[in-house]
Structures are given as structure tokens and as C-alpha cells.
Amino acid sequence: MNNVSMLDLFRMEVEAQAAILNNNLLALETNPNAATELEGLMRASHSIKGAARVVQLDAAVKIAHVMEDCFVAAQNGSLTLDSADKIDVLLQGVDMLLSLSQVPNPQLETWLSQYQSEIENLVTAISSILTGNLNTHIKSQPVTKVVHKAPSSPSPNKDAALTETPTNSLTAPPSVTCDLSMLALFRTEVETQTTFLKEQLNELKSNSDSLVAETLVQAAHVIKGASKIVQIDGVVKIALALEENLLAALKRKIPLQTNQIDNLLRSVDLLLRLTQVSEIEIESWLSKHDSEIATMITKITESPLEQPTLKDVLVVKEPSTAELVTNTSSISDRHKENSFPVPVPVLDQPVLEQKPETRTPAIAAPKAIAQESNKESSLHSAQNSQSVDRVVRVSADNLNRLMGLAGESLVEANWLQPFADSLFKLRNQQLELHNLLEKLQESLADQRVNQRTQSYLSDSRKKSDECRQFLADRLSELELFARRSANLSDRLYREVIASHMRPFADGVQGFPRMMRDLARRLGKQVKFEIIGKSTQVDRDILEKLEAPLTHILRNSVDHGIESPDERQAVGKPVEGTVRLEAVHRSGMLLITVSDDGKGVDIERLREKTVNKGMTTAEMAAQLTEAELMEFLFLPGFSTAKSVTEISGRGVGLDVVQSMVQEVGGIVRAVSQFGKGMAFHLQLPLTLSVIRTLLVEISGEPYAFPLTRIERIVTINKSDLRYIENRQYFTLDGLNIGLVAAEQVLDLQQSSLNLEVFSVVIVSDRSNRYGLVVDKFLGERDLVVRPLDTRLGKVPDISAAALMSDGSPVLIIDVEDMMRSIDKRLNNKLLSRISQGSTSTTPTQRKRILVVDDSITVREVERKLLENKGYQVDVAVNGMDGWNAVRTGNYDLVISDIDMPRMNGFELVSQIKQHNTLQSLPVIIVSYKDRESDRIRGLEVGADYYLTKSSFHDDTLLNSVIALIGD
């Protein structure tokens, strides 16, 4: 965590503690005297207050402080948090803390100025809970969502330091009186700064002429300030000695001597060792190393340089003892004692003189903090035997690369076993060789051959035996290694996949609060349940789930759950129930959102579809309930009678559908009118690995995601039907169009005489097709590998993967393929499926690729050629054309010369050097009419070089006809 600043740690602390505050405050609504929840609330607010003091955010200190007062009073029995209004105000405090913590560093001062009055009003409102004068009409302040980015370098943080008068005693016993959460922040800060110091001091040691940089002084200053906050005197003294020694060298502009640097490095090592000590053992560790600390300080201060004191270069301010919250008499004296602001070091200000008699220690073991933390420290002391989890921040990109490498490792390990099997064939061949040599020796024994020949033959048999035995031994070792390697790679892969997973609870922490606020706003009583919080969900999927689930849950409260009077009138409990459940089932993640509300009136929904012009009355009457429910997921469709802030705007369930399809899942809605409704989201467990159906198309393997397949069937050719030159078959009363997958993918068409066809049935919202493949190869889990971005969007393909033998396989993009089928059918580019003849494909139009970066020229050429009956595709530059010509089956290429990424000369040269494309005719059409350009075009392989004036006569068309015919 070396790249984490104190403000970053504050943000993480607020995020973690805010979740506790939200959950426990909601729990208090049902049980206001819950001791466990109150204890958690007090500790959470106390931790935020302490963290806010570290980073000198007085606004956060004020809010957390007064919230803690409320929770302490509730624990003591002098206050009962028994009303929703009180909980509302406290929840607003949580929102404000979260909002404040998410503001980026450069905008923090501006944000605090902008929201100063809101913060003061909020503090006053929370304080009024203590006095019993709560104003129930306090307006809720919206939480400002701000995206925060962590700093990328561990440079010393000036804002995290303290300015303090050095103490005279060097051997005073260390003291630790701060709570454990503060010590954790301190350990992280010291680790960051000592690592920086060590690197810089080693550089100084390797280059004796280098001068001390100001950042070194600042790093030592930061350590000193942080240690004062947590009251670890021993570290304060070491850091102070470090700072003064470095400051002396900086002011005198004299390089440090080797022995000085060695002493400084030893002191840094001592501090670094301290960061490895757990929070609960710091005090005993400091006591044990008291003499070592004193010796180290003495060595550092024994410098040949005349060192100036800090008062010569730093402005030391007396800390203010102003009250924490103005006009808030309800805050206890105990909290007022320690409501001091933390001074900031001013290293770049003019030197100011300060009178010695006014200099008193700013934070010399303040007893107030110790008193505040006694209760929390005692709670932590019960966990002394438990080890503290270490957390490492790893970027998502690094994790994705690690997963890719783990997948490659798995593939490589799986290659070993087939290789071992191939060596068994070699062993068998050696055995055959041995037998042949034996027969040869027996045959020669009956003939008169010289002794030398017999000797050679005998040696050959012996050597053959040795080779066979050696190979057998090595094969056994290889098999053992292959099994161990496969097992290890599989374990590694599973662990990396597991690192991508997070518990479902991580993504739904804010939902209870949202549901509670929404129900109160609508005047409804709602019980919200979350089942399966520990269910593991892919990190990427979990992030995408927030918006869809938010829409569904809001709909459940707004459209589904009735008002208390309505529920009571129909004999239902006054309190409605909304349930969110996550579970693994059949290798998929199933998320269900259900409610016991009024459900959907199917007849009203049927009427709505007709009124919106989405279907005719006759067709609507024939639609099944499941088909009608699909209309709910269409953009702009809403069953709300009026538009409100919450619903009726036609935005919501189409977002759910889009997200689910994006990750390769499906969603369906089920309703019982008067009893409730449920949404079922079926999603892949992870986006890193998908379950696929492997098929063979035109002799090559392809993969269909299982979640996008409706069904696979085999049909007889006698089941094929035709209408308007289109093929279809009937399955379960539905007519399903039949298309050859090889035609959609522009692959070489097979000429198999098939009696039975293997069909993969896929669909989208409006169409359903059966794709004919060569054969089914079975189901397989594949590690998804994205295609190179330089390829652009490859038609009908979403990604790639590696088979167990290392061979590549392409994963079909079903959505894109559905669009391709529609386009080809509309343009009549698909032929009938073969029914036994070697070729039933009708004569196809000649295909021409036009490559030009000018849209005007492309359109002129396209229309000119299409009017003559040619099928024309276009490419916008040379690289785009090169990708197209390799994947398409073209009869001719027409190219410009001056284009970005790859010019026309380069494109023609690439085509003519390609083994399978070198016979493809090419015409260059350019504004360049110089003879040198024409000669160069013909030299690289163009069949014709024309100028763009040929558009005005038949020159271009005549050239095309001469090359490929009509």
C-alpha cells in the first residue's frame, strides 16, 4: 500500500464505517435499544472522527463527533433513537460524510466552502436529537457523488504532517495511547515514508556529490507528525533527529558523509521494522527496544555539521482549543477537550522568530484522546490472538493480465499429456525396431556372415534395449510431471479466478438504505430481505448489476407494493416484502427480485401494447403471458399512469435487458396478478470464463456461449420447408428459419451429402433462427481472450480462446450474427441449405471491395458498380481494406492511393504477396495522373491504373468487366 496517502486511507475508512452506520441505523428502527448495533455505531463514528483528525478535516470531525455523542447517549440510556425522523437526520450525516470523503484533493477546499452552511445546519440538527428539539422538517441534503482517483506516486504528503516543538528528553519511555484504527493509519504512513527515505538515502550514498533534497526533510517531518498524533514518543524522537540532521545538510548545501548516511539508514530500518509489528504489539515492541532507540538518536545527533534547530526554519503555531461545534451546547466537555485543529508545516515560508516561553507541546500525550479510545481499545484487546489480515491493492488491469497468464499456464500444462501420449507411440515404434533387429539376427544366424557383422548387430540390439528402457523411464517421469503440472496450473487458475470474485453483499450494501428511504417517501411499509450475501460474483458483473437492480427494486416499491390501506383491504399484511436473492445454480448465477405486491395486470398490459401501437389488437389477443411480459423490457415502455421522480419516464427495464445481454445472460419476468411479481436474471458466474458449445463449421471449431443458445436439435432433410425461397422447419409449433452458419461467416461451403442436419437455435427480441453446423463437439469452459484492438470489430465474433491442445477457437457474437442474418436475408444473399447435391448455390453476384478514405468517392464508385449488378463493400482506409480483403471473398479490389494507416501502393503490395490473394485482380483509381505514379502502381501489381476522371465515362466499368466479367 505504498501508494496510498493519508487522505486515501481516510476515504477507505469512511467507506467502510459508513456501511456499518447505514446498516446499524436501519436495524435501530426495528429495535432502538439493540446494544450490539449501538456499540457498532459508536465505534464507527469514533473511527471516522479519529481518521478525520489525522487529515485535518474539521467538518468531518464535527459531524462524526456529534453523531458519536448521540450513540453514546443512547448507550447510556439518556436517549432513545426510536423515531424515523431521528434516524433520517443521522443517515443524512452519513451521506454528508460519504460525500465529503469522495471529493478529490484539489476540489476539497472549494467543496467545504460551498457546503459550509449545510454542514453547520446538519451538525445543529444532529445535536438537537440530544436536546429533544429535533426539527422534523429538516430538508434532506443530496449526496454529491464524486469520482476519486488515488495518487500514483508515494511522494511525501505535506498536509499529513505536524509542526511541533522538539522535546529535550531523548530517552523518555515510549507511550502508545491511541486506538487501533489510528495505529493502522500510522503504520501505513510510516511504511510509505520510510520506503521513500531508504530509496533516496541509498541514492545519496551511491553518489557522494549529491545534495539532500527537500523531499527527504518533508518525509521525516511527515513521520514525526503522524507519530505525534498517535502519541508514540520514541518514533517522534527518531523522526525529529532525522529531520534536523537532513535539514542541516539542506541549509548548508553540504553532501552527507558516508557514516552519516549509514546512521540515517539504520534509523530508517528501525522505523521500517516497526511497521511490521501488529497494532496490538506496538507498545511492547517500543518498550523492548527503548535502549536501541535512544542509542540511535544519539548517533544521528552526533553530526560534524552545525545543525540549525527547527525554530529557525519552521513556523510553529500554538494549536487552537476552540470548541468543536459552535452554537451546539449539547456536546459534552469530554469532546470539546480534544477538538483541536492539526497545524500544517510551512516549509516554504520566510523564517519567523518565536518566543521560547510561548512554545508548548501541541499534542504531548493528550489525555482526552486516550479517554475516548479506552472503550474501543478494550474491545480490540479481546482479539489479541487473532492475526490482522493484510490487504494489497492490485489494479484491475494487472489482475486481468494475471488471469490471462494463468489461463495460458493451464493450456500449456494440458499440452504435456498429449505430448506424453505421442511419446508412447515412439516407444512402441522402438519395440517394433527391437523385434525387427531380433528377427534380422535370427535370419543372419542361418547364413554365413563374418564376426564383425554379428557384433554390430548384437550391439544394435543392445543399444535399442537401452534406448527403449531409457525412454520408458523418462516417460514415467514425464507423466508424473504432467499430472503435477496440470494440477498446479489448475489450482493456480482457480485461485486467480477466485480473486476476481466478490461476495454479493459487496454490491448491495446501499440497497437497504435506498429501499427504506423510497418506502418512506411513498408512504409505504416495506420489509427488504437480501438472501445469499456470501454468494460469489464476478467483480465486473457485480459492478454492472447496481443500475439494473436499482431499477427493478424501485419498480417493486413503486409499482408493486401497495399502500398500507390497499394491502389491508385485500387481506394482506400491512408491511410488504421485497426479496433480493443470489444463488449459484447449474453453473450460472441466478439473481431473483420478488415482491408480494399486486403484480402486473396482463389484460391491462395487453391493452397498453395496442394503445402504444406496438402491435395490433388481433395479434395482441393471441400473445401468451410470457410474450406480453417481454414488452416491459422495451425502451420507452412504462405501465405507470403518471410521470414522477421515481417512475413513469420509460427508462428502467430496458437498461436491465441491455446489461444482461451485454454480459451474456438472460432475464425474464413472471407475475401473478394480485400476488406479486418476480424478475429472474440468469448470468454467467464470471466474465473471465464462459461455458460454451463447441461446434464445427466448415471444418473449423467455433464456440457459442451457452447462455445465448435456446436449443440444439437435429432435423432430417425431409423436415425442411420453403416459402419465398427461404428455408424453415417447424419445432413445437413454431416456424424457425434455417440458415447455414458457414454462409453467414463467409466460409468455404461444404459439399457433404447430409441426411440429418445439426442445428443451433438462437434468438433475439424479434427473430429466431436455426444455424446449421457441421457437427456438435460438446460443451467446454473457455477462458475469454479479447481480440487485438487493431483488428477493430470482427463481424460475428466477440472474442477468442485457446483449446486444451493450444489451438485457437473463435467465440460467436450471437447478437451480431443475428443482425448479419437479417441483412443477408433482406439482400437475398443466402442460398438454400444443400440437400444432397454437391452444389445447389445459385449464381452469386460478383463482389467488389472499394477502398477510399473519401466518402464522396466511395459512394460514387459504389453506386456506379451496384447499378451494373455488382455487390459492393467499402473500406475507409488501407488497413481497413486489408482486414476486409483477408476475411471476405472478393472478386475485385478498387483502391485509392493516398490514405491513412496504409496507402494504396502498400495495400496492393500486401495483396500480391499473400499466398491466397495474389491472383485477386486490383484496380488503382487516383487523382494522381503522373506517369511515375502509374508505373509504380503497375509495378506493385495493380492490373489497371485509372484516374478518377474515369467516373465520367465507361473506362472504370469496362476495366471491371474485362477483369471479372458482368
Image: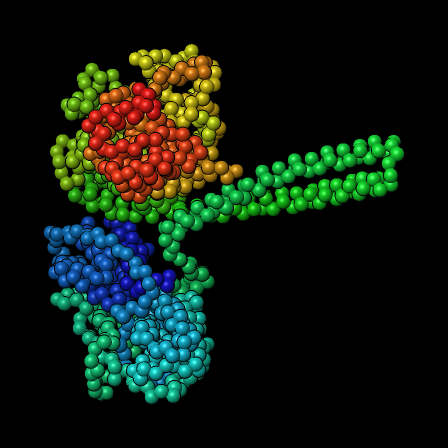
Q: From the image, which quarter does the C terminus lie in?
A: top left
Front in this rendered view, residue 933 or 14: 933
Residue 350 placement (x, y as % from top left):
20, 80
Q: Residue 180 sits in which quadrant?
A: bottom left
Q: From the image, which quarter does the N terminus lie in?
A: bottom left
* Left or right: 531 in relation to 411: left
Residue at the location (47% across, 16% down)? 753
Total labels: the figure holds 0
Residue at the location (35% across, 85% down)? 169
Residue 223 placement (x, y as % from top left):
34, 73
Residue at the location (20% across, 42% down)? 519
* Left or right: 454 in relation to 262: right
Q: Is residue 834 visible?
A: yes
Residue 521 placement (x, y as % from top left):
16, 43
Residue at the location (37% across, 35% down)? 941
Q: Residue 958 sits in which quadrant?
A: top left
- Can you say whether 98 is above or below 881 in the image? below
